[in-house]
Image (cartoon, rainbow, N blue to C red):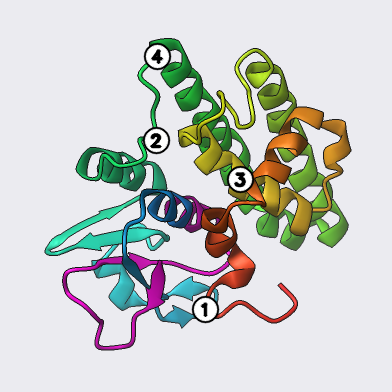
Amino acid sequence: MAATAGCGGGDSNKLLLYSHWMSSCTCRVRFALNLKGIEYEQKTPFILGDRFGPEYLKINPMGLVPALVDGDFVISDSFAILMYLEDKFPQHPLLPIDLQRKAINFQAANIISANIQPLQNISRYIAEKFGPDEKLRWTQAHILKGFDALESLLKDYAGKYATGDELYLADVFLAPQIHAAVKRFSVDMNEYPLLLKMYEAYKELIAFQDAMPENQPGAPAEA
C-alpha cells in the first residue's frame, strides 16, 4: 500500500505523504489511505535537532507532519487531508449517509484531534519543567478525560466499530489514539470496555497493521 520515497521521489502519479513514524496524525492518514486502497509513497522530512529542517517549511509552514502532495497540490493537517481524500476518492466512504451518525463521527474525531492529541504532544515541555514522572501523569490525565467522553458518546452508536459495523472517520482517529495510549503511555484499557473491544477489532485489519507506527520506515526495532 505504501512505499518509501527516496531523495529523488518516486512515481509522480502517486500521492506523497510526508510523515514521521511516531506521528499519530500521520497514522490516521495512512489508515484512511489503506482503507481506501490508495497507492502512496512516504517521505520523512529532514530533521534538524528536534524539529524538521527549513526545507520542509516550504511544504508546510507550520513545520508539522503530515503533509500530502498530490501532483502540484499540497495540503497539510490530518483532518484537512482526510476530507480531501474523502472528496477525491469516494471508495470506502469515511462518513456515513445518516446525518446523526455523521455528526457523531465528527464529534469523536474532534475529541481526539482537539482535546487529546494536542495536549498529549506538549508533554515534553511538561517534562522539561516538572520532570519525566509529571510528563506521564499529564499525558495520561488528558487521554483518560478524552476516553471517558468517547466511551460515553459512542455507547449508543457502536457496533463492531465506533458508529456501527463499518469503519468510518471516528475509527480512523480512534485506532491510532488507542494504540498510542496502550503502547506509549501505559493506559489500562480495561477501564474502557467499549474502546477496548474496538481496538481488538482494529488489530485484526491489515489496513490498521500496515498503518501503525512500529511498521513504518525509521521505526526502531523496539517500537
- Residue 113: horizontal and vertical position, in percent? 52, 39
Looking at the image, is mark 1 or mark 2 earlier in the sequence?
A: 2
Marker disc for residue 175: 3
**CA separation in Å, label 2 and label 4:** 12 Å
SS class, disc 2: loop
Question: On the picture, is 46 further left or further right than 161?
Answer: left
Q: Residue at x 23, y 38 (%)?
A: 87
Q: Between tags 1 and 2, which lies in front? A: 2
Query: Which stretch did the figure color magenta?
Result: 1-29
Q: Between tags 4 and 3, which lies in front? A: 4
Residue that numbered label 2 is attached to = 94
Rendered-image quadrant of the C terminus? bottom right
**CA separation in Å, label 1 and label 3:** 20 Å
Asked whether 46 falls inside the magenta stretch, the response is no
Residue that numbered label 1 is attached to = 217
The answer to the question of whether label 1 and label 2 lie on touching residues, with beta carbons closer than 8 A, is no
Looking at the image, is mark 3 or mark 2 earlier in the sequence?
A: 2
Q: Residue at x 42, y 53 (%)?
A: 29
Marker disc for residue 98: 4
SS class, disc 3: helix
SS class, disc 4: loop
Q: Is there any visible trace of residue 23 in the rendered image?
A: no
The answer to the question of whether label 4 and label 3 lie on touching residues, with beta carbons closer than 8 A, is no
The amino acid beneath tag 1 is: Pro
